[in-house]
Image: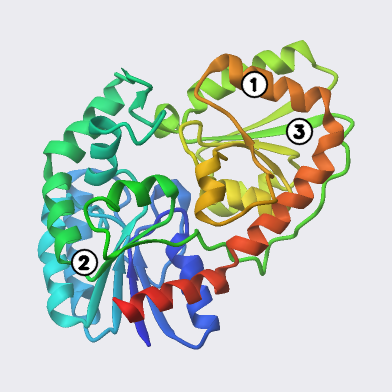
Amino acid sequence: MRILLIGECSNLHWNLAEGLRALGHEVRTAASDNGWRKYSYDISLNRPTNSFMDGIGCMCRILYHLPEFRGYDVVQITHPYFLRIRSERALPVYHYLRRHNKKVFLGAFGTDYYYAKACMETDIFRYSDFKIGDKYRDTPENRTEIQECLYGGTAKANQIIAKSCNGIIACLWEYHVSYLPHFPEKTAFIPLPIDLREITSRVRSVPEILNFFIGIQSARSNLKGTDVMLPVLQAVQRKYPNLCRITEVHDVPYARYQQLMDDADVQLDQLYSYTPSMNSLLAMAKGVTVVGGGEPENYKIINETELRPIINILPDEQDIYRKLEDIVLHKERIPDLSAQSIEYVNKHHNYIKVARQYLGFWETH
């Protein structure tokens, strides 16, 4: 099968491509490296900044490579914003892909119209990026994102693509339940793929000093919840300076992020998520215990009844403090949580197993 994957989200498409290649398929990826993240790809659609001139350069790259985006059995895009241009401006490219390839699929891999609509207009979620209970998280970043996703170009493009594509694949429980009411016949959940070949898994022993790792994206700290988690973590560290320490990294490339995580015992990530992200799964594959999204819905959607490796936290400072203090005072839990984390990723997120799930969905839709 000839497969083209356009756009990138935390190396999801690259890991998937490697799994598909291992199964004997011809795969190409086209994406931007997303600035400092430095994601991997075969075809560069890079846009270094959001400046007008870099936008023109990005459009030129897209037009130059457009003839190569023909004749595939499957094309998958990550999001309505699958190119580093405004979603409504990417629509002609989407229509081109539909005309010149057999099937086109949409990835529900991030905040878009359907996820924002579920957050703002339903009670599906107990908490989310945009609401906690009935209280809106009214921040400048959220106002901008809500405006774009619900009323802007992303809303228009998302609805057109979702209605006309061959199928929709959600990588998290949250995205799956957002799309399912609208497109029950062509929406599926498939776990995130983790390429395990170059990951060194190590079951952590009981540490003398617990090393907490927190990675911060400066432009998205509010959306990821690190602006809440970091001060709480610092308060715990001040109370127990001889029992724990903090490794804090800001805006580092993906490969460097992985290296810096190697010595961690516990990682903090994604306060408002119900499910572990790519960064969390990468940590878990290494044997690092994750403090973040591990709600019952996460385990249910993957049919996991025994493993519980994630220390689930709520978007509440007292809950975060209590969970962090508990792991500091009960470090003897670390080896078991570490072993469970490795087993969990191998069981549910192996990149070849996930690639087979994608193939099955693509073939039947």
Label 2 secondary element: helix
Q: Quadrant of the N terminus?
A: bottom left
Q: CA distance from mark 2 to mark 1?
A: 43 Å
Residue assigned mark 1: 233
Type of the residue with mark 2: Ile
Where is residue 69 drawn, in percent x and y? 24, 78
Whether residue 253 can be seen here: no
Q: CA distance from mark 1 to mark 3?
A: 11 Å
- What is the crowding at mark 2: few (fewer than 14 residues within 10 Å), some, or many (at least 20)? many
Q: Earlier in the sequence, mark 1 or mark 3?
A: 3
Identity of the residue drawn at 52% across and 63% down: 193
Where is residue 76 drawn, in percent x and y? 31, 69
Q: Quadrant of the C terminus?
A: bottom left
Where is residue 38 drawn, in percent x and y? 46, 55
Residue assigned mark 2: 62
Q: Is 43 rendered above or below residue 35? A: below
Residue assigned mark 3: 211
Q: Nearer the viewer, mark 3 or mark 2?
A: 3
